[in-house]
Amino acid sequence: MRIDDSFMVRHGRGLAAALVAGAACGVSGVPVAAETNAPVAVVTVVGAREGAPPAGPSLTVLDTSVLPIGNQVEVRSLSGLAPNFSVADSGVRAFGDVTTMRGTANTPFFGSPGTVVYLDDVPLGPTFAQGGSLWDPRRVDVLRGPRSTAFGFNAPGGVVRAQTALPGNDYRASASFGYGSFDAQSYEVTASGPVVKDRLSLALHGYHEYSEGFIENTFLNKRADERDALGGRGVLRWTPTEEWDIRLTVSAERFDDGAQPITPLDPEDRYQVESDLDAITQLDTQMQALRIERRFDWGRVVSITARQDWDLDPNTVDLDLSPANLLAGYVIPGLPIDPIADNPLQGATSTIRQRREQWSQEIRFESPPDDPSPLSWDAGFFFMAAEVNGTSTRSLPGLAFEELVIPFFGTFLVPVGQIVEYQDTAFDISEQNYALFGNAGWELCRGFELKFGMRLDLAEREINRVRRVGEERFEVRKPATYTNIAPEFGFEWECCDMVTFHGRTGLAFKPGGFSAYSDIAEEAQFDTESIWANEIGVRFEAWGGKLRLGATAFWNEVKDYQVERSVTFGEYVVINAPEVTARGVEVELLARPFEGFVVGGNFGLTQAQFDDYRDPYPQADATGVPIPGAERLDYTGNEVPFVPAWTASVFASYRHACGAFARVEGTFIGDTFYDELNSPYFRQSSYGLLGATVGYEHERFSVALYGCNLTGTEYFSYVVPSIVAGNVGAPQAVGFKVTLKY
């Protein structure tokens, strides 16, 4: 049994209020231009959408149906809009991002995703490949909790599902221009319509965005974090009969960016950096997808074949964020006077090139959504093959010494110059995944349904890796296979027209794999993370949908939780923490007290902590050398890194019948630690972002003024303990957007 969510369709325009100018300002990224009506968090609803697998409970709908005239909606711009959903933004187009949902997270570079993103039924792969545009989605759903039995790509933490508008028999076109703070510019064109009426239609979408950035490099006397994005997408839809729906999608994006917007954690000015490296990030992405749907009397079959190519070439970083070198700490040879000379990263740089090609095939069989039978079901098969090729080069400066003989005092070694040691790592990690998945629901009596789901999963991984330091070579070659079973049980009870209870319990997992930055095969490999997930909740709806309230409590027990970090200088691995518990609550509210006015919000609380975790590696000094006699650190009882203690968002919007509209929104992220030790120095305290938009919409045009981070909150969206730096969130920004429509 599924609850009808047609309220969202009937009143989508009234739900235009966006939470946070996150989609407008990119939350922590560079402000490009604002969306006058970015996604709005709506209360928990249940129901399958056209062309999408069943949703299940704990679904937050982010409505984007009104005036999608802002910069490109990205996954990071949705952070905080659903309870207990957050994105730690590294500032490199998702490369290194950590997305958390109810305490389940990906590792920055090498683990499988905890939260999977589906765009028009195509899985976008690992988190680092989720940084592109969501292409003006008409709807975004955030499904909280494991969804491994409902989707082909394994989703142990949850799913972000975006759906774009389909081309049809109506001709539509638009052109827009936006301008804002930091010379932020956006240009966007769309066109959609029939080629052959009722049979063949086409949709095209192109955009260009630019910003000079907000980080000032005082050493190079320029803005450091320039952003430049160019993208295009086409969708060809063929409907030869009412039973067939065939879609071919092709898209490509190019990102030509400056430096990652990172600064030291305690600078005099958080928006300034002093670096001698003109760092860059260049990224190209492509996707081709073929979706074939065939409807029968007994249900439908959907096949999605996709190829994706993600190419980072290169990403460069100044690891010490300064113009200093090792000689900078000496005023005369042999006499150190500056403590910064002891920094092992002083003068060090990093260059990474990485490419990932992914092929996926998903086939789903589903019962009809309007079937009066008490039995509902869906089943599917999933296959994925991916290849990751990467190279990284670290330049590690050292000092050249010569002997200095001083009569009567002896012979001394004194620094006379700087030498550079290069560490080159090349790796290839292959992945294959095979899965069977499905769900069944049985309505035992009117209003009460039992549910059962199952996933059988086989994951194969293999690493070939070599690191060169001078004439030395360190090789790692190893295959691994991971087999997992994930059953799930649940219920829904509609006890009356206004109140529905739901609950479920089940197993989920993140398969193991390899890190490319360890010289030892046993340490490069990590094990599967196993999750026992439980939740129970209630939904309340009154006055014909004008008031909606949802509340859910969850409790997850995790074995071998995956944690990724540097353990010694040059060794970067994924560690399995033996036991973690994540528990929390989620509350969502939506109210429409009168026509045109919408108010709502949500709150999520998560306590994710290590129940058993002693560091398997000894303590090391600043150069990565183990400290003799030092005990291994015990993190038991500490909070899990990257997981905010809480999230919240509130909004209010009003749209007059004449076309005028206004909204105000706030998003709040609770205290977040970025290391297992829970060091106060590597903690981002709770913060809030305030945004507002006013504008006017006509049948043929719209205009909007926006403000992001209006209170000028300073915060880090990501902290990197290994280099004592963080990614700076975007400062206050204002701008406008004009759109012409046909």
Image (spheres, grey):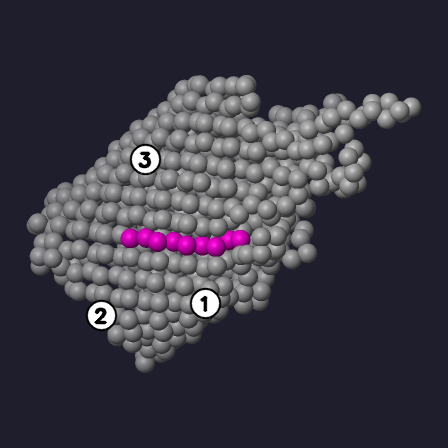
Q: Which residue is mark 1?
A: 180
Give yes or no for residue 230 being in the magenta stretch: yes
Q: Which residue is mark 2?
A: 742
443, 676: nearer the viewer: 676
Q: Secondary structure at mark 2?
A: loop
Image quadrant in which you'd find residue 303: top left
Give the residue type that dot 3 points to: Gln
* Image coords of residue 409 (percent x, y): 89, 25
* The C terminus sits in image quarter: bottom left
Tell me how far mark 2 sits from mark 1, CA to CA. 25 Å
Tell me how far mark 3 sits from mark 2, CA to CA. 37 Å
Q: Is residue 718 visible to the viewer in this orientation of the structure? A: no
Are the residues at dot 3 and dot 2 in contact (C-beta closer than 8 Å)?
no
Q: Which mark is residue 358?
A: 3
Give the residue type that dot 1 points to: Gly
Q: What residue sits 36% from the left and 44% below the top? A: 284
Q: Farthest residue in the bottom direction?
A: 658
Q: Earlier in the sequence, mark 2 or mark 1?
A: 1
Which contiguous range is marked in magenta?
A: 224-232
Give yes or no for residue 484 being in the magenta stretch: no
Judged left or right of residue 403, residue 116 is left
Q: Is residue 452 above or below residue 409?
A: below
| Residue neighbourhood size for the residue with mark 2, other residues' Cα within 10 Å, grouped as few (<14), some (14–19), many (≥20) | few
Q: Secondary structure at mark 1?
A: strand
